[in-house]
């Protein structure tokens, strides 16, 4: 018996639903069914609205209720039966899923890959605004402050969301390119943030000048590797047109108090940084380092003993007009000194991160 072919799915993400609309049109054809989810009614009514349409017009519409818990989790849980129904109808050979503006591709794709074997993720496309991209990547405005949070627990900021959407995309559509005087610089920035991506500009009407769906480019392992830990020098793109990526590495641990005091200096001029760090007062723990815009965070990854690596610090940082020597010096100053390394017990150091780790 011949195995049934999987239905390819193209995923569309991006903050601006207006800029996404022409791209959505370009992703669909006569054999495509599109599922579009918006969050306009989420702040007031606590629901995500969805509509289904194909070339013949609207097919169905409804709402997903979002409670006080994780809105993204509830969306994914509610979305699966809808997608299963569309695949079972077997009327189309391609699905386009337009996610809510504040949704990241990674959790959606991970769930689709593991829970819906009848679907294969074909392309992840992200639409970014050439006029606002640098601002969105550089600030500290929370999604909640813009009415875009996916539920009450959502404390992400705009920069974090924008960076994560870009980092998981096979295709980045640079909309409003005609309104920018630095298109090549922006294209370079996108490639620094995600060397896997193909950058496609949009014309004055917002229509992309290249393929944005059915590209067959999505590779789950490659996407996960890039979205995970950045720790290799081959991931550093060559500097150019004002965009620089720096790899900083040390076999010494970081002094927790000095790191905390230096956070503002570390993220100054950096639009995005990620890595794995070692705090002296937590000698066995591997810690995730992440920054987007003016916000930085640490999270627990596990124990060093669970890996093949000796304890170390590795951070990859990308910025516009970034001074690599200054950043290296700021990070180096956070390391334990020779005399501190000789101290027998580092666990007694003050721990400003005790409340978050």
Image (cartoon, rainbow, N blue to C red):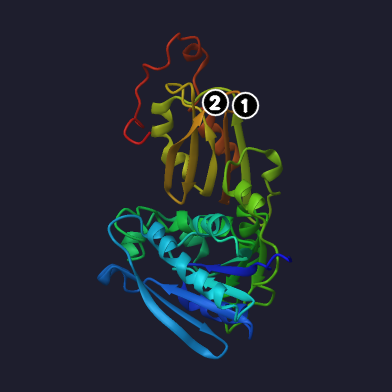
Residue 333 vs residue 184: left or right? left
Which residue is painted at 58% across and 84% down in the image? 205
Which of the 4 image quadrants contains residue 119?
Answer: bottom right
Does residue 227 lie above or below 126 as drawn? above
Q: Position of residue 308 (x, y in %)?
A: 63, 26
Q: Position of residue 28 (x, y in %)?
A: 60, 80
Q: Residues within 10 Å of mark 1 (few under 14, many from 20)?
A: few
Identify the residue position indicated by label 1 in the image. Answer: 309
Q: Residues within 10 Å of mark 2 (few under 14, many from 20)?
A: some
Residues at discs 2 and 1 in contact (Cβ within 8 Å): yes
Foreground of the two, 283 or 248: 283
Q: Quote the CA–CA distance across marks 2 and 1.
A: 7 Å
Q: Quadrant of the C terminus?
A: top left
Does residue 22 lie above or below 306 as drawn? below
Identify the residue position indicated by label 2 in the image. Answer: 304
Outermost residue, bottom direction?
A: 56
Q: Position of residue 85 (x, y in %)?
A: 50, 73
Foreground of the two, 72 or 17: 72
């Amino acid at each position: 018996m011949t195995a049934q072919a999987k239905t390819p799915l193209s995923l569309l993400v991006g903050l601006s639903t207006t800029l996404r609309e022409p791209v959505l049109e370009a992703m669909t054809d006569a054999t495509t069914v599109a599922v579009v989810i918006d969050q306009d009614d989420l702040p007031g009514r606590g629901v995500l609205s969805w509509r289904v349409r194909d070339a013949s017009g609207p097919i169905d519409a409804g709402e997903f209720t979002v409670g006080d818990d994780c809105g993204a989790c509830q969306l994914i849980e509610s979305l699966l039966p809808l997608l299963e129904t569309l695949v079972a109808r077997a009327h189309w050979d391609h699905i386009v899923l337009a996610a809510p503006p504040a949704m990241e591709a990674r959790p959606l794709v991970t769930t689709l890959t593991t829970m819906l074997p009848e679907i294969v993720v074909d392309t992840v496309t992200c639409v970014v605004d050439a006029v606002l991209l640098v601002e969105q990547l550089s600030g500290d405005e929370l999604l909640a402050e813009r009415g875009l949070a996916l539920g009450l627990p959502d404390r992400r900021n705009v920069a974090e969301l924008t960076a994560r959407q870009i980092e998981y995309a096979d295709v980045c559509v640079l909309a409003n390119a005609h309104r920018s005087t630095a298109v090549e610089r922006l294209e370079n920035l996108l490639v620094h943030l995600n060397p896997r991506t193909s950058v496609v500009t949009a014309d004055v009407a917002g229509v992309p000048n290249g393929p944005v769906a059915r590209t067959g480019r999505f590779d789950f392992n490659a996407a996960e590797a890039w979205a995970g830990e950045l720790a290799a020098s081959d991931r550093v793109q060559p500097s150019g047109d004002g965009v620089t990526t720096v790899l900083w590495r040390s076999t010494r641990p970081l002094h927790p108090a000095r790191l905390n005091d230096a956070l503002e200096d570390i993220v100054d001029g950096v639009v995005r940084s990620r890595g794995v760090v070692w705090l002296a007062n937590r000698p066995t723990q591997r810690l995730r380092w992440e920054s987007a815009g003016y916000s930085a965070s640490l999270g627990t990854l596990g124990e060093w003993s669970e890996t093949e690596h000796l304890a170390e610090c590795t951070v990859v940082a990308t910025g516009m007009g970034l001074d690599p020597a200054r950043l290296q010096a700021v990070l180096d100053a956070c390391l334990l000194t020779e005399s501190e390394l000789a101290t027998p017990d580092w666990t007694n150091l003050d721990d400003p991160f005790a409340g978050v780790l």
